[in-house]
Image (tube, rainbow, N blue to C red):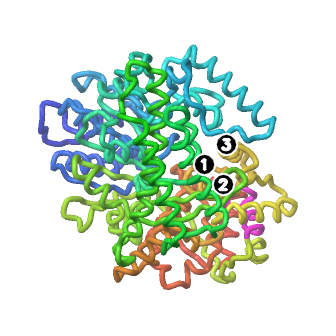
Amino acid sequence: MPVAFTAVPDSHLPPVDELLSVAVNALGGSDRQGQITMVRAVQKAIDDDEHLAVQAGTGTGKSLAYLVPSIRHAMDSDSPVVISTATIALQRQLVDRDLPRLSEALAKELPHEPTFAILKGRRNYLCRYKATAGWPEEDEQDQLFDAREVSVTGRMVQRIQEWAEETETGDRDELVPGVSEQAWRQFSVSAQECLGASRCPSGAECFAELARARAGEVDVVVTNHALLAIDAMGDLPVLPEHEVVVVDEAHELVDRVTSVVTSELSEASVMLAVRRVGRLIDQPVADQLMEAGEDLKALLAAAPPGRIDDMPQVLGLTLQLVRDTAWRCITAMGPRGADKDDPDKAGQRKAAFTALDEVHDTAVRMLDAYGHASESDRAEVVWLDGATDRRPPSLRVAPLSVGGMLRDKLFGERTVVLTSATLALGGTFDALAAQWGLGDGKNWQGIDVGSPFDHPRSGILYIAKHLPQPGRDGLPQQYLDEIAELIEAAGGRTLGLFSSMRAAKAATEALRDRLDVPLLCQGDDSTMLLVKQFAEDEPTCLFGTLSLWQGVDVPGPSLRLVIIDRVPFPRPDDPLTSARQRHVAAKGGNGFMAVAANHAALLLAQGTGRLLRAQDDKGVIAVLDPRLATARYSGFLLNSLPPFWRTMDPAVPRAALQRLTADPS
């Protein structure tokens, strides 16, 4: 039956409710009150120039609910709206499915058929000039692989070269199957390395510039959180001018922005700068930087990994040496922009300046991190990442908070709508709003438009209160027994979400021979293929860690049981998280609740959200960690979850799963 909404027109364009009605009638669906509420709230935020946080449960149709008012605003203002996502999967859903269908549905209601484009960071596009011209060698540590890996990389390079001759977009995601980062780096440049369209011999046909030009001519630009941050915080704009941003998967915003503004310093990054400066300066000057890099290498090899609260004198002196020798190399390079008439030389100089600037500026940033009188005044944290099989140790520096940057650079310039299925932690938006820098709520509103699911009737939240608290020595035998009994009751059909890969693998090894159903573990194959196999074969179980907590969308009978081994608090030795907790405590707050509990609540909400993905879904979420029932913070965590029917009786979920297995309807 046709859906009809009414509203008073406020411009020459149809009112937003009318456009939503057209879209719903054309694309299918029903009159969802949550969707209507969200559409109106987004339109009001745009009209009032006010920020908005919207929690919209799975199945609400939130992409349609923000795309309709976004497209309307783009038409009304002749200014594009930017949609930012955290994952490639959602970008592809928007560009390949949602926007094409919606544009066609609304074409007759608007001045023209809505247009859209996807825009990524420059590293995601093939650089025509780098692919055809001489370019400084990449870090030679990338060559230190065995012969088999070199051969595999060589085949990838050849495939990229063949693809480069035929691609129309240069977009790395269109290269299927994909290639390694090592191979791709030989054909791409960062924004800092790019010569610029006006100076590059291939500037007129640059894939990145062409993508940006397309983005400047459309109504909706789809991008990612990292590029959104780079655009907001950088000196040069990356995205076209815009007045409105919609941040989907907004629960990921802080982590993605933090990654963008985290810097790294290692012997490898110093030696890369030495190689790139090459013959461009006198060798004795370059040798000074090389010696500083060797000193840094020796120091990091002997130091224990972890957060560095007080800078040791020897580290401070080494960082000063790296800073000063890098600056001497920069000075020896001469004026930036020289050799502009020699593209090959200009490319080498730009690459050298980029590497030197990164080394110099990171050393300065690390030294400045300790220039405050007390920990409560400190703005950044420095830590040492230990060596792995694939990489040497490195120093990292990141801000304790990105809220100030977001407040000034993102929220201060435009209207921002933030949405996700999980934003209200402990029942309020305050925790994430504080992380975003929105403060006391004077310039923003938060609404929860609910969910189309009847959670108490569709799902059981079972908390295994009788089990012992999880320890650090792996999964107790009682946990393994509980997992086995639940899976047997469900006839497989289980997604196991573990707090670490070690725990996921241990459970897999212990239960594979014990269970009569197929058991997959993350790492056995690509995650995408494992999820596909899990979804297509009903009895199959899938165990894994972080990416599965947020990245699995399997509606139907293949998923009846979600098992969570423990409350997903951050690791106590995580340098950035622990530093943030101490910083909050130093200012008189509750560091555990402000940081660790919020982190756990967000992941728990995401994990429990894997169960109900379609209207007919039913099942059980089993949390094996008794702290969710007994700890003082349990109420906060439970208030962050959907309102499933709760029980602590082990017999209840097993009986429910057995009934579902016997009669899926």
Q: Which residue is mark 3?
A: 141
Q: In the rendered structure, are the residues bearing label 1 and label 2 in contact, judged by CB atoms less than 8 Å apart?
A: yes
Q: In the rendered structure, are the residues bearing label 1 and label 3 in contact, judged by CB atoms less than 8 Å apart?
A: yes
Q: Residue furthest right?
A: 513
Q: Secondary structure at mark 3?
A: helix
Of residues 194 and 450, the one nearer the viewer is 194
Figure disc tally = 3
Which residue shows up at 37% across the image and 27% down it? Answer: 338
Q: Residue 30: percent from the left, percent from the top?
A: 39, 43
Q: Residue 55: percent from the left, percent from the top?
A: 37, 57
Figure quadrant of the N terminus:
top left
Q: Is residue 452 visible?
A: no
The mark found on residue 268 in the picture is: 1
Mark toward the start of the polypeptide (3 vs 2)? 3
Q: Alpha-carbon neighbours of circle 1 within 10 Å: few (<14), some, or many (≥20)?
A: many
Mark toward the start of the polypeptide (1 vs 3)? 3
Q: State which region is magenta.
A: 483-496
Which residue shows up at 46% across the image and 56% down it? Answer: 363
Residue 558 shown left or right of residue 122 in the figure = right
Q: Quadrant of residue 52?
A: bottom left
Give the CA distance from mark 1 to mark 2: 8 Å
Which residue shows up at 56% across the image and 63% down it? Answer: 459
Q: Secondary structure at mark 1?
A: helix
Residue 518 shown left or right of residue 127 in the figure = right
Is 492 colored magenta in this rendering? Answer: yes
Of residues 272 and 405, the one nearer the viewer is 272
Q: Quadrant of residue 659?
A: bottom right
Q: Alpha-carbon neighbours of circle 2 within 10 Å: few (<14), some, or many (≥20)?
A: some
| Kind of residue at disc 3 | Gln
Q: Which residue is mark 2?
A: 392
